[in-house]
Image (tube, coloured by chain):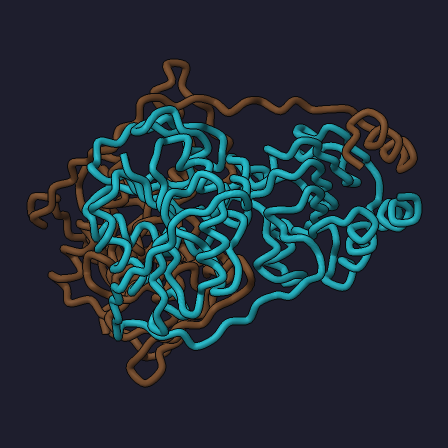
Chain colours: A cyan, B brown
Amino acid sequence: MKILVIAEHDNLSLKPATLSAVTAALAIGQPVDVLVAGAACASVASAAAAVVGVSRVLVADHPAHAAQLAESIAALVADIGTQYTHILAAATTTGKNLLPRVAALLDVAQISDIIAVKSADTFVRPIYAGNALATVQSEDPVKVISVRATAFAEAASAGNAATVESLNIVKEQALSAFVGQQLSTSERPELTAASVVISGGRGMQSGENFVLIEKVADKLGAAIGASRAAVDAGFVPNDMQVGQTGKIVAPELYIAVGISGAIQHLAGMKDSKVIVAINKDAEAPIFQVADYGLVDDLFKVLPELAEKL
Amino acid sequence: MKILVAVKRVVDANVKVRVKADNSGVDLTNAKMAINPFCEIAVEEAIRLKEKGQAEEVIVVSIGDKACHEQIRTALALGADRGIHVDTEDGLQPLAVAKLLHAIVQREAIGLVLVGKQSIDTDNNQVAQMLAALAGMPQGTFACGVEVQDGKLKVVREIDGGEQTVLLSLPAVVSTDLRLNEPRYASLPNIMKAKKKPIDTLTPADLGVSVASRLRTLSVEPPPERSAGIKVASVDELIHRLKTEAKVI
């Protein structure tokens, strides 16, 4: 057994989702190597070497890897991938973009979004928006797996000193070029890592009204999410969407405001420890999964919550 | 440029499926079926590119048993020019689907492939990336903006932190996200016209593709049920219970 975890990073810091992927890798077996492919990414390599359970960090540091485009990174991973029994990455948009390309280059299946490791070849993954859990077994020589980060605890990020080796493989390609990105900046905790999340839905009626949610979030130190309806209506940007095809969250406390509870939204938050629903429609399906439901007008409830918390 | 759009027949997005008693899968008996919502967005985008004069032909393909003719007809009614049905059993793995699509891409000299980013049944999110790898093409996944620019394709992608823009050489593979467009409805005259549009039927053998898989589903179980909790009467009661009972604030 030999496992490779692909680090997710922005050339400066290691993303916490990688720590969950390491935990999933350790549940499969050892040794666990971590690949850091980027440009001027030495700080990420050091961070990866400190993660408990990691045996070796491979650093492919090259200007061609600056934007970590799937076309070149997948070729790199496939090149070293045959030395491994398992290749894992977190099921973030980065991992989802990269891993299937790796799997196809290796002519193996990919197992998406696992939530449990049964054995070295058997895994559990949600299907139908989490309304069913499939246990799947792979006979592929290399198992390519994306990991649902909320289903695995983060490996300790300090206390290890894995060896760091540089990897002089560059698969430059002329197929795609990075043009730019517009990243949301927020002082709030990251949606997928926050212990409290408060989300607004169509009931918010406008983007401006999200200020009511922000005031409550400020009191709770919460991240802010949204339902697909709120994103589709243009109230808030896409990176706030919680659901089957958006972000999967599992905080200690999830507060759903003006969200009816469509199947695809529930898929993104129903593993939260405590769920609160605030909705004026007593029949809204969100109440079927809520631990605490408050049937009332959100425009009255949110200011009161902000004041009393 | 010829555009290939793949559409998958899936259970309607509003149906809450139940796991079969023998844990062999989910029960879809008499369930309402539809084009996967992301695939519908891909069809719409292809038609818009054709309407803008950036594509000459839109070919729609669906892979599965005969029932998926219904979804091909829907796409034809929306404006696709002709259909291809790859006649196989249902439930092929994404790698097999990507291999079949790759064979069609080669046969038809396709300039752009548009597919949904994921199907709402198996939730894999793999086919576009796999097809791009097999065909040696660039990929623009989770697209919320697609524009042909000087013989290249500018794709805006929805990513975890916001949006990213990439420039792809053509031919390319694009997977569509929710905000790319709002699909139109088929008009009655177009539904009638679609009945006369051709649909070719091919088998994996015709395309020279083996659809065997080394991935098996051992069982399908229902998720742990979350039971409904209680209704609280006021904000005060809610805060009190979150503090003293749930202890989460």
Q: Is residue B191 visible?
A: no
B191 or A57: nearer the viewer: A57
Q: Position of residue B23 (x, y in %)?
A: 38, 18
Identify the residue shown where x is 40% and y is 62%. B44
Q: Nearer the viewer, residue A163 or B19?
A: A163
* Residue at x 69% of width, y 24% of height: B228
Left or right: where A279 falls relative to A131: right
Q: Residue B5: image x %, image y %?
A: 29, 59
Q: Nearer the viewer, residue B155 or B89?
A: B155
Answer with left or right where residue A113 lies relative to residue B236: left
Q: Residue A65, position in %: x, y?
A: 36, 68
Residue drawn at the location 33% of the way across and 72% of the way down: A64
Classify residue B216 by image quadrant: top left
Quadrant into which the C terminus of chain B falls: top right
Where is residue B2 drawn, in percent x and y? 23, 69
Q: Nearer the viewer, residue A213 or A62?
A: A62
Residue B223 shown left or right of residue B29 in the figure: right
Which residue is located at x 15 percent, y 67 percent?
B109
Q: Residue furthest bottom?
A: B150
Q: Residue furthest top?
A: B22
